[in-house]
Image (spheres, rainbow, N blue to C red):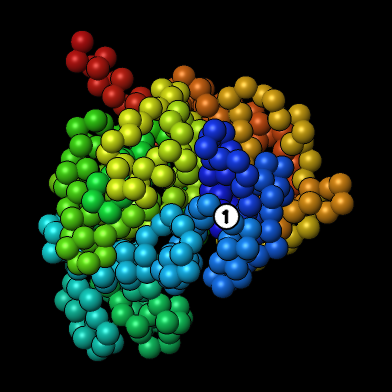
Amino acid sequence: MIGSGGREHALVWKLAQSPLVKKIFVAPGNAGIDEIAENLPLAADKPVELADFAQSSRIDLTIVGPESPLVFGIVDYFQSRGLKIFGPTKAAARLEGSKAFAKTIMERTGVPTARFQVFRDLKEAVATIEKAPVPIVVKADGLAAGKGVIVAKDREEAVKAVTGILADRVFGEAGGQVVIEECLSGEEVSILAIADGAHCILLESSQDHKRAFDGDQGPNTGGMGAYSPVPMLNGSGIEQVRKKIFEPVLKGMAKEGAPFTGVLYAGLMLTSDGPKVLEFNVRFGDPEAQAVLPRLKSDLMELILAAMKGEIHKVPVAWDSKASACVVLASAGYPGKYDVGRVITGLAQLKDLPDTLVFHAGTRRQGDRLTTSGGRILNVVGLGNNLEKALEKAYQAADQIQFEGKQCRRDIGAHALNFTRQGRNREIAKR
Ligand code: AMP
Ligand code: GLY
């Protein structure tokens, strides 16, 4: 496993339960992963060293957690050395690596998404903004660690954003092109699929909480929590997502000569015109994986191996009917500047609690102490017969964990709870 976050801990936790898995090495891992697998002092962005290790240790299969090695072509490189690896090739990873490419594929295959235009030239971009309705969305083309999207409330902010991207290159290479698109509104939902190049299976829905503070206020983060399933998208909505989004995109990528094998993540907006794609990612979501994987009853290793054989549609997938909720504990200051090295306490008593899981992200072992080593520190997951119960479990456990500067959102799942409450009120009003 390549990576070191909460997503990778959840993946390793799940894979370790498979009878098909004998031993897992993680490069570079974290303090939580170290308890169930073997961490390696190898960085995720060093393909040659990683392949050398895989070869000399006769690793049967490598799985990639984060996007950046995929976009830079680690899968092609491993394959060129005869090493088995699960994830999209460099050409297929362009669905996340280039927003302009993703939009073009969507346009070509008729996938519902915001109307858009792509620009390299600043003057042309500015001229378009001057005539466009606001709010309007400006996106740097390439990878920008989640910071490359600006939802501009007026033209001035939009012009500032395109100038920053195209002229000042605030996102470096990622800013060679800019996508300007229509602003959509609605609930956001993440749907992840495991794809085998031609077919896919959809995993259960989840919702991320991107803003730092309660009530969706404050700056965007990597994600402050998630829950699964999302009641705002029902069974027929999910079928629509499969037929109108995943199937055409997979077909389009195959036609393009870049069939997609790996995890394809669609970030959707549930608009009044139905679900539309905001973006594609080419890997598991973080923290979505921490909320979704504990509900997966099937053997994840079996699913991955089936995908690699082009047989994903032949494997039945089973889910726990329980709901899950994941609360992220972060360092004070995150997503801006934060301190590291704070001692973490309170984890030991949570170990064997039922329906409670803790996945590590930015943690380190220093002697016999556990300390913080990043922005997002821990992911506390609760499971329950409904979302309220899952949240109760998650927050009970989250409140027992202490470190200086600990911050978390107290309103994970609020959109879903409101939606369910409103539905109940409508039912009562009808009677
Ligand atoms: P991304 O990094 O592409 O996931 O975008 C970050 C966030 O920007 C999304 O989660 C949405 O909240 C928002 N966003 C992206 N595209 C649009 C759009 N066309 N309309 C409204 N909001 C958007
Ligand atoms: N949670 C958002 C992402 O993984 O990109």
Residue reaching furthest to the right: 367
Residue 172 image position (x, y, % from top left) = 45, 82
**Is residue 239 placed above or below 139 in the rendered structure?**
above
Q: Nearer the viewer, residue 106 or 165?
A: 106
**Is residue 90 placed above or below 197 in the rendered structure?**
below
Q: Residue at x 38, y 88 (%)?
A: 167
Asked if residue 144 lies left or right of residue 180, the reply is: right
Q: Residue at x 26, y 70 (%)?
A: 101
Residue 199 image position (x, y, % from top left) = 24, 46
Q: Which of 340 and 136 is in front in this view?
A: 340
User: Which residue lies under the disc numbered 1?
Assistant: 59
Q: Which of 134 and 79 is in front in this view?
A: 79
Q: Which residue is drawn at 79% across and 48% down?
A: 370
Mark 1, secondary structure of its residue: loop
Q: How crowded is mark 1: few (under 14 residues within 10 Å), some or many (20 or more)?
A: some
Placement of the C terminus among the 4 image quadrants? top left
Residue 399 image position (x, y, % from top left) = 68, 34
Asked if residue 294 lies left or right of residue 4, the reply is: left
**Is residue 141 placed above or below 109 in the rendered structure?**
below
Q: How many marks?
A: 1
Asked whether mark 1 and ligand 2 are closer than 8 Å, the reply comes as no
Residue 278 visible in the shown view:
no
Q: Nearer the viewer, residue 289 or 247?
A: 247
Residue 28 visible in the shown view:
yes
Identified by mark 1, the residue type is Ile
Residue 328 image position (x, y, % from top left) = 58, 45
Asked if residue 350 lies left or right of residue 99, the reply is: right
- Residue 136 picture quarter: bottom left
Q: Residue at x 79, y 41 (%)?
A: 345
Asked if residue 356 lies left or right of residue 305, the reply is: right
